[in-house]
Amino acid sequence: MVQKAGTKRGERDEEKLMPALPSNCYKTPHGYVFRIVVPESLRAAVGKREIKRSLGKDYRQAVSQARLLALQVDQQFQSLRQQVQQEADYTQAFARYVAQAPNLPLKPITKVTPALVSGLRALWLSSLEADLAWRREGIDDEEYQELQENIQEVQAKIAQALARGQPEPFLPVIRALLVGKGYQLAVSAAEERQLVLDILPALQEGYDILAQRQAGRLVQPKLTLEDIPLPAVWEPTASTNAATSRNSGLSWQELLDHWRQDCPRKPRTDRELQRLVQSLSSFLPKATPATLTRAQVTDWLRHERDQRGNSAKTLEKKGTLVGAVFSIAVKDELLEKNPFAGFDYNRFAAKEGLAPESQRRSFTQVELAQIFSPQGLFGITTSAGGGGYH
């Protein structure tokens, strides 16, 4: 057989054995390319109309990389959508607040609580993000020098206030933070003084970070998911929304990472689960761990059956493995439901070539006699002592 010029039989045979290229991946004369169009609502945040990546010329690696990129891009888009929605909700809530009577009094805080201290600390440290964005835009020599002098001066004042137990110079700072969110302190002087003493270490931490940034180390504050900034008066459910956002915004990678934290996982199991999650998220690009439904699970398993020829037993293995990850997240209250729980995998057994009962031939008398004979499958024997089944 004469091989056509410019073709490689080995490569064609390998491609036949591999799954089809994902829809967001295509082949060019120079190799494989990943390409996905950025949704119009997210283009301003992403800064481009589409995302393109070269995947090289190896078919197997291109398929693997395309699936991973699709998962990463989907997570990025999901995160950006939540950010855009949160900003829009905040803007609308603030507009409603401002539209109220100009003489609307500030909301009084009548008790100093650990939650208040934690909220103010997180509020101050999270505000340093603006400083980082400002630096990345570029600052001139005069701005840099002025900032350097201010940081050194405030650092010295904070150190003195903490060392001497005299927080009074920083009372206006804490009051300004509260007023900016629509609050005013209505507590005794002693309670206010204690509140400022409790917040001063966070102020010191923030200025230490600013000093490091002045030295070229663009460090970030150490904040966790539990560090929720004090919500503004116009967002009374901000803390609840933040917790809900963390749950509903759980990415596929975060779901896997949480599963890995319990105990060391076998590399083979880890790789298999990573592959299954990539397959699931690629097949359902708009779904997240929190929004995944039983119907979507069914669609994915049917896809695995029809496109990969998986048997009911293989589908059960896949679903049970992914379901175990969801189960851990549900137990730890990261998710509300496990769409794989109690799934009936026997429903797929009919696709394994089993003939319907109406088409099955009945046993003949000769066959029944053989089956139930002493040597047959259900024959009775006395070799077990007193009678027993083979």
Image (cartoon, rainbow, N blue to C red):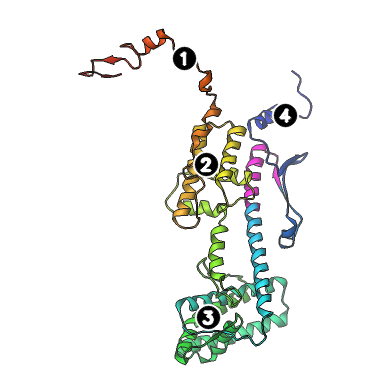
| Circle 1/circle 3 CB separation < 8 Å | no
The residue shown at (73%, 55%) is: 39
Q: Quadrant of residue 2?
A: top right
Q: Main SS type for the magenta part?
A: helix
For discs 4 and 3, the disc positioned in front in the rendered view: 3
Give the class, few, some or many, for how many residues have Cα within 10 Å of label 3's Cα (few <14, many ≥20).
Answer: some
Question: Along the polypeptide, which appears first: circle 4 or circle 3?
Answer: 4
> Looking at the rendered structure, which numbered label has been put on residue 272?
2
The residue shown at (53%, 67%) is: 240
- Whether residue 64 appears in magenta in the rendering, the answer is yes
**Which residue type does callout 4 highlight?**
Lys
Question: Along the polypeptide, which appears first: circle 2 or circle 3?
Answer: 3
> Looking at the rendered structure, which numbered label has been put on residue 362?
1
CA gap, disc 2 to disc 3? 47 Å
**Which residue type does callout 2 highlight?**
Glu
CA gap, disc 1 to disc 4? 53 Å
Quick check: 91 above or below 250? below
Give the class, few, some or many, for how many residues have Cα within 10 Å of label 4's Cα (few <14, many ≥20).
Answer: few
For discs 2 and 3, the disc positioned in front in the rendered view: 2
**Extent of the magenta region:** 54-73
For discs 4 and 2, the disc positioned in front in the rendered view: 2
Question: Along the polypeptide, which appears first: circle 1 or circle 3?
Answer: 3
Residue 350 x %, y %: 53, 28
> Quick one: which residue is furthest to the left in this view?
386
Side of 329 where 78 appears, left or right: right
Residue 201 visible to the viewer: yes
Question: Along the polypeptide, which appears first: circle 2 or circle 1?
Answer: 2
Which residue, given by chain and number where applicable, does mark 3 sit on?
204
Q: Quadrant of residue 387?
A: top left
| Circle 1/circle 4 CB separation < 8 Å | no
Residue 252 x %, y %: 56, 52
